Image (tube, rainbow, N blue to C red):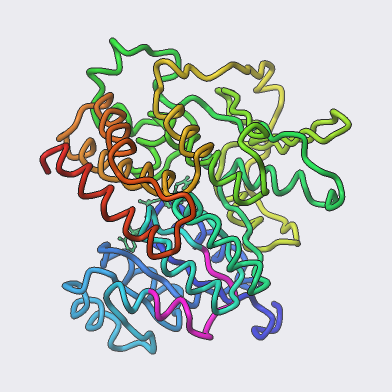
Amino acid sequence: MNDPQQRKRIALFGSTGSIGTQALDVIAAHPDLFSAEVLTCNGNDDLLIEQAIKFKPHCVVVVDESKYTKVKEALSSTDVLVFAGEKALVEVAGMDIYDQMLAAIVGYAGLKPTLEAIRAGKAIALANKETLVVAGDIVMQAALANRVPIIPVDSEHSAIFQCLVGEVRNPIEKVILTASGGPFLGRKTNYLVNVKREHALQHPNWTMGAKISVDSATLMNKGLEMIEAKWLFSLRPDQIQVLIHPQSVIHSMVQFEDGSIKAQLGLPDMKLPIQYALAFPQRVKNEFPRCDFRRFNTLNFDEPDYRTFRNLGLAIEALKKGGNLPSVLNAANEIAVYAFLRNKLGFLEMTDVIEETMQKVSFIGEPSLDDYYESDGEARQYAADLIKL
Ligand code: NAD
Ligand code: MG
């Protein structure tokens, strides 16, 4: 085992989620390389307690303050410090008790702790794409100013990142962002109008949290990923092509100026990009199942159905127009998705809510961080009023 001094100390923000729990599996498999020093959750106190007992972090944060006493009592016989609330989440992100953050909170809630971590000089393994959708310019500038690497966890962006290793001086002509198409690939509006939560949560290739599962079903996820790619790799909108690839074996591709294309392939398993982002620049041996191409003797590619999956067009509009529009798109989408998940809004109505909110919230061409916060609040309020929440 490595000297414990040399182990990378990881802070898992969103440790109880789909990405967070898979990251803990990776950490548990490599105790010589990593230790979990911070675990955080919104309200899943039972799982947080279980994780804290197993991984013995420096501290845990439960955002829902009503859960504080229970977590504190459950961990009273350990050395684990317990904090609660949104403010504590941001404060812990700035503490000198870890080396790298895994940003795996879902949605806008991930932005503030991630920015704080960047300001504190921590490397970021970024799963929380909404952070870049909302305030990509500010986040990337802060990373540059603090010399902080942002290593993507999102499988497509991890693929692009991996294709770019060793290509520092070679400009990108375009990136090809692959998309499985989600559970409703090939379906039309007359089918989608009746779709309910249970259908939308059944993704063919990936098991994920509820919000990103719905985003994958509406193709909003791919739209958010286009905006994420713009900031991560400094791309113009016309350099980002979305390609439907139902098998999810090619995780994405980069085309260089000589026309040559590099791709990264593998089975659809988030543990691989998580491990890559935690261990970068090392590739760590593991026991994950290997890709057998005899099982995939056909790989298909197609153009997305923009007429049916209108969210993708809305995201492209936000990508092209920039300013605060992506943050408005994101906020309206979060409100719409949570309303859909509670059966308060139809599948196709989500798009109407996002579209109308984007038209109504005032456009700001060069927003400050406070402008982004305000646009987020304004868009949430507008979307919630539309749905009559
Ligand atoms: P999830 O819903 O399974 O987990 C979310 C985590 O965030 C949980 O630990 C939860 O407690 C915490 N959380 C939720 N709301 C919070 C709040 N208001 N404040 C603080 N913490 C809060 O989500 P997930 O599927 O793990 O996704 C996490 C992020 O990773 C998302 O941004 C998603 O887009 C991205 N991502 C996920 C996958 C995947 O396979 N799941 C793939 C690529 C990218
Ligand atoms: Mg993805």
Report the magenta residues as a range.
Answer: 90-102
Residue 185 image position (x, y, % from top left): 45, 18
Q: Quadrant of the C terminus?
A: top left
Residue 72's place in the image compared with 376, above or below, is below
Which sits in the foreground, 241 or 81? 241
Q: Residue furthest left?
A: 388
Residue 217's place in the image compared with 234, above or below, is above
Which sits in the foreground, 239 or 23? 239
Magenta-span inclusion, residue 96? yes
Residue 20 image position (x, y, % from top left): 45, 59
Q: Quadrant of residue 359?
A: top left
Q: Quadrant of residue 173?
A: top right
Residue 49's place in the image compared with 173, above or below, is below
Left or right relative to 383: residue 237? right
| Residue at 23% across, 69% down | 64
Which sits in the foreground, 129 or 201? 129
The number of numbered discs placed on residues in the rendered structure image is 0
| Residue at 63% across, 74% down | 146
Residue 84 image position (x, y, % from top left): 27, 77
Left or right relative to 162: residue 349? left
Q: In which quarter of the image is the N terminus?
A: bottom right
Which sits in the foreground, 372 or 45? 372
Magenta-span inclusion, residue 279? no
| Residue at 23% across, 35% down | 340
